Amino acid sequence: MKKQNKLKIINDPIYGFITIPSELIFDLIEHPYFQRLRRISQMGLSHLVYPGAQHTRFQHALGCLYLMQKAIQTLKFKGIKITKDEEEATLIAILLHDIGHSPFSHALENSLIEGLSHENLSLEFMETLNQDFNGKLDLAIKIFKGNYDKEFLTQLVAGQLDIDRLDYLKRDSFYTGVAEGNINSDRLITMINVRDNQLMIEEKGIYSVEKFLLARRLMYWQVYLHKTSLGAELILIKILQRAKELIQKGNELQSNSSLSYFLNHNILYDNFSLEILERFAQLDDYDIMTAIKQWQNHSDRILSKLCQMLINRKLFKVKLKNKAFKAKKIENIKHNIQKQFNITSEEAKYFFFEGKTSNQAYNYDYQQIMILFKNEKIKEVSQVSDQLNLKTLAQPVVKYYICYPKGLQ
């Protein structure tokens, strides 16, 4: 039998040709768990605002693999000791870092499984894959969890200036067409170094760091927290909440077996199991959208209305403010919703959402970005930046929102 060539080359629109560096990584990419990421959108429902944002977690993961290869080669060239096993393990950790995402990525996090973030679920997938691959992911899991003595390897996977962020900012900027997010990832990777077991940026890269942090702030308000995307994702969450409520009341809803399981059961961290993980591995964006298309004709007016709104992009009006909305205004809107739709105050909760969202481009309390000078002095980036007030970018910006149907009388 002819042996399969596993050292493939993949053509990526951002970076060009991406090489798969080992047979183990090829086999992980081929695994159904990873192939599922082809059917998980990278940016949830952002395509309702930016039509080009149709890329997937699969593409993002491969982009991260490419950038991590460049980062490791850069560090090795600068004399940082990284063994072959450590290199492969770090590549595996970044490849699988998002494997636990729910359908529509962050939009449905905690909607299907409560109390388990996508990072927790990614670790569950990695532990299961490790059994399938006879312990070959042991080191990758240690690096992913931050339990390995070379801290800088973990910082490359998850940190303030990690490979994940370098890819998603550049990739999301490309697919949305929002030029403000286009960072120079090549320059940043060229400038990385390690001292005292910590990842840092050489002095010449400080302006690229400033651009990176500003791009992150702008992309969050302009893209990730865009009010229309926010409103659409809240409708999606409410659709699943209503579906669960109807099922609990004895109503029948059409959906495939994978989605039906999560609608009929309250899955919590305490009752999570391998069986549930396998069922979760069968869920993707297609299952959710197929169900929503079916439910738009359901006899329940609330469920059908919400589904029709999402399918036909008849989305809510969303208002953002720097301070909380007055209680009287909120009560007036809720009253108008009840009156216009002829529903109870309890049912009106499906057509009115309120909350707050925040954006913090740089967090001092979480792996500070350190700058390495030629004289070997090390300083935190905000202490040496002369182009931007990075302390301002480190302050969380909080905005309050309300969402409700357009055209309320």
Image: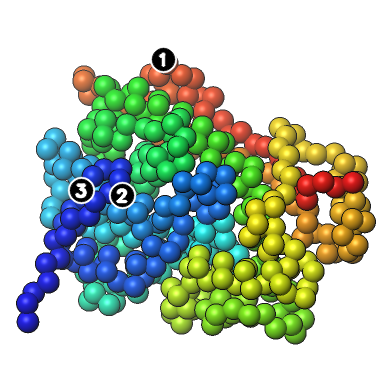
At 20% from the left and 48% from the top, the residue drawn is 17
Mark toward the start of the polypeptide (1 vs 2): 2
Return the x and y of residue 98 as percentages of the image width and height. 40, 58
Return the x and y of residue 66 as percentages of the image width and height. 24, 48
Mark toward the start of the polypeptide (3 vs 2): 3
Task: Describe residue 187's horizontal placement relative to residue 100 as left or right.
Answer: left
Residue 114 appears in the rendering: no
Of the residues shown, which amino acid type is indicated by label 2? Cys
Depth-wise, is mark 3 or mark 2 nearer the camera? 3
Of the residues shown, which amino acid type is indicated by label 1? Asp
At 88% from the left and 64% from the top, the residue drawn is 343
Which disc, if any, is residue 64?
A: 2
Q: Quadrant of the N terminus?
A: bottom left
Element on which disc 3 rests? strand
Return the x and y of residue 399 as percentages of the image width and height. 67, 37
Mark toward the start of the polypeptide (1 vs 3): 3
Looking at the image, residue 190 lies above or below residue 262: above
Disc 1: CA contacts within 10 A as few (<14), some (14-19) or many (>=20): few
Which residue is under mark 3?
17
State which quadrant residue 208 falls in.
top left
Task: Describe residue 376's horizontal placement relative to residue 235 as left or right.
Answer: left
Which disc, if any, is residue 386?
A: 1
